[in-house]
Image (tube, helix red, strand yellow):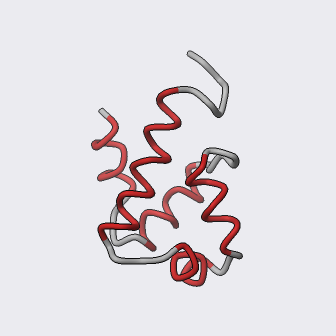
Amino acid sequence: MEKSIYSAEYQQLCALLRQLRLDAGLTQVEVAKRLGEPQSFVSKYESGERRLDVVELRYVAKSLGATLRMIVEALD
């Protein structure tokens, strides 16, 4: 199991989160506001510069109108 934040699997997650945001018609600023974080937080996890832990991922999913289960299943 590769532990790098640059692994193909993690990049797939980043792309999925970005696509979910776009599908929801949201900007990074809007998602950041929902999360109570700066826009750079969203930019960094979408680009793979920052890793999300499972709790953060759950909040991000909710802010995008998704669930953690939906995200995990999309990555299978």
Residue shown at 44%/47% (left/top)?
15
Q: Quadrant of residue 33?
A: bottom right
Q: Is residue 30 left or right of residue 4?
A: left
Is residue 54 depicted above or below 12 in this figure?
Answer: below
Q: Is residue 2 left or right of residue 41?
A: left
Q: Is residue 70 left or right of residue 57?
A: left
Is residue 13 depicted above or below 26 in this figure?
Answer: above
Query: Residue 57: x and y, percent?
Result: 53, 56
Residue shown at 43%/63% (left/top)?
61
Q: Nearer the viewer, residue 62 or 25?
A: 25
- Extreme top residue here? 1
Residue shown at 34%/77% (left/top)?
25
Considering the image in quadrants, where does the C terminus appear?
top left
Residue shown at 48%/76% (left/top)?
27
Is residue 73 depicted above or below 42 in this figure?
Answer: above
Give the mark count.
Answer: 0
Query: Residue 12: x and y, percent?
Result: 43, 38
Q: Quadrant of residue 35?
A: bottom right
Q: Nearer the viewer, residue 39 or 52?
A: 39
Query: Residue 9: x and y, percent?
Result: 47, 30
Considering the image in quadrants, where does the N terminus appear?
top right
